[in-house]
Amino acid sequence: MTDIATIPLTRIDGTPDTLGAHQGKVLLIVNVASKCGLTPQYEGLEELFQQYKDKGLEILGFPANDFGAQEPGSHEEIAEFCKLNYGVSFPLFAKADVTGADMQPLYKELTQAHPTKQGPAEEFRERLRGFGRTPTEDPDVLWNFEKFLVSKDGKVVDRFAPGVAPKDPALVAAIEAELAK
């Protein structure tokens, strides 16, 4: 496996970045979308970021158009939508695939490092089937707003299903446990 800290990333404004630049922080990596039923999670993610950023949490949003074409906008449109509608101040990155043959290298490593997710993944899969969609199976990302928790030393320590809200007690407890280390 590749060291995830060294994978080249691009911020939504085009500036280069890596997870290594965030070393020493607890990271919550989330694939996001602007036109999804889960899009209101942006509000909870921003609240979580504000609550814990001074304690060492960074939330990193990765827009993806993989699921139902729910992130069709340009980088500028995505950034503006997030800022105007949800006051997002945590870093957003360039839109890229989180599933399939063109999966960005970071997501390839995240899903290999932690192939299963906590939370109501099976219930979420059933809901997707009810909408006529064919859901992915582990280790693939299930849908928008799946969350990966990365420790201060760059290890993927947990993964949460899309339906796990930012204020879910299990997610908050996992973040707090990592921040305490």
Image (cartoon, rainbow, N blue to C red):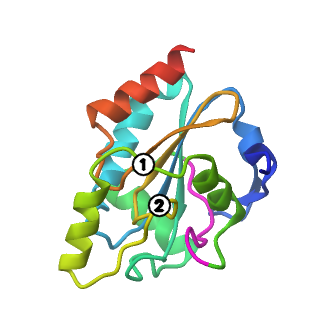
Marks 2/1 in contact by CB < 8 Å: the verdict is yes
Q: Residues within 10 Å of mark 2 (few under 14, many from 20)?
A: some
At 38% from the left edge and 69% from the top edge, which residue is drawn?
Answer: 34
- Residue 135 vs residue 63, the one in the foreground: 135
Q: Position of residue 181 (x, y in %)?
A: 57, 15
Instruction: Tell me if residue 155 can be seen.
Output: yes
Q: Position of residue 45 (x, y in %)?
A: 38, 44
Q: Secondary structure at mark 2?
A: loop
Give left or right: position of 122 versus 80. Answer: left
Q: Amino acid at mark 2?
A: Asp
State which quadrant residue 156 falls in.
top right
At 39% from the left edge and 43% from the top edge, which residue is drawn?
Answer: 46
Considering only order in the chain, which callout, 1 or 2, is on the residue closer to the N terminus?
1
Magenta stretch: residue 95 in it? Answer: yes
Q: Amino acid at mark 1?
A: Lys
Give left or right: position of 72 versus 169. Answer: right
Q: Position of residue 169 (x, y in %)?
A: 27, 30
Give left or right: position of 74 versus 127. Answer: right
Q: Which residue is mark 1?
A: 117
At 71% from the left edge and 63% from the top edge, which residue is drawn?
Answer: 105
Tell me the CA gap for discs 2 and 1.
Answer: 8 Å
